[in-house]
Image: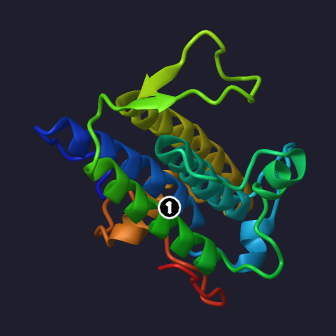
Amino acid sequence: MPGQAPPHADERELLLAFIAQQRDGVRYAAFGLTDEQARVTPTASALSIGGLVVHVTQMERGWMDTVLQREGAGTDEDSYESGFRLDADQTLAEALADLDAVAAETATIVGGMSLDAPVPVPQDVPWFPDDIDAWSLRWVLLHLIEEIGRHAGHADIIRESIDGANMYELMAGVEGWPATEWIQPWTPAEDSASVNG
């Protein structure tokens, strides 16, 4: 997807396009990394690119669990913390494929519902309001844009800390833009294999 979400007259398609744009920001940050690089935590936090891919996937899936009122993985401390890690037995390519799967599932779920459909507010989570019974599906989608966008920004900083690559160079590399005076598409080093190009 280009740097801007495409215009849509249909509100549902527009919201999904903005969610996709933010997901792409996370995906671009992962472009060309090895599994080992995807696990690196180069900043003061414990965040890694691979961990952010895993978290964004689990977070979006968790919101779809809430929308459908289906049983999810839960939010205990162990599952929350492990949801920010690319485990040793998981590859970055697998994590990105799972991100694609949750994107397709979200589109299917949202496609079959009214944007005004009520989504019950979970009452067992301290950071959710206790004076609201339900959000709308529209609110949930707007929240996903905000939440994924925040993590795309985290991923940008982490990627720059790994090898100096920035979002525009990475986007240009992923999308095959021609080189110009003001932007050079990122390409992997000669001795590095791309895991998701």
Residue appearing at x 41%, y 55% in the figure: 106
Q: Nearer the viewer, residue 65 or 189?
A: 65
Q: Is residue 178 left or right of residue 147?
A: left
Residue appearing at x 82%, y 54% in the figure: 79
What is the number of callouts on the image? 1
- Where does residue 104 sit, x and y in percent of width and height? 38, 64
Res 182 visible: no
Name the residue tied to disc 1. Answer: 28
- Above or below, 64 relative to 89: above
Q: Is residue 41 left or right of residue 60?
A: right
Q: Amino acid at mark 1?
A: Tyr
Q: Nearer the viewer, residue 175 or 62?
A: 62
- Above or below, 163 relative to 9: below
State which quadrant residue 87 falls in: bottom right
- Where does residue 43 sit, x and y in percent of width and height? 82, 47
Res 128 visible: yes
Label 1 Cα neighbours within 10 Å, binned few <14 / some 14-19 / many ≥20: many
Q: Residue furthest left?
A: 9
Q: Secondary structure at mark 1?
A: helix
Q: Is residue 83 left or right of residue 165?
A: right
Residue appearing at x 49%, y 23% in the figure: 134
- Where does residue 148 sit, x and y in percent of width and height? 53, 43
- Where does residue 58 sit, x and y in percent of width and height? 63, 55
Q: Nearer the viewer, residue 13 or 5?
A: 13
Coloring scheme used: rainbow
- The N terminus: image quadrant: bottom left
Residue appearing at x 36%, y 53% in the figure: 109
- Above or below, 102 relative to 17: below
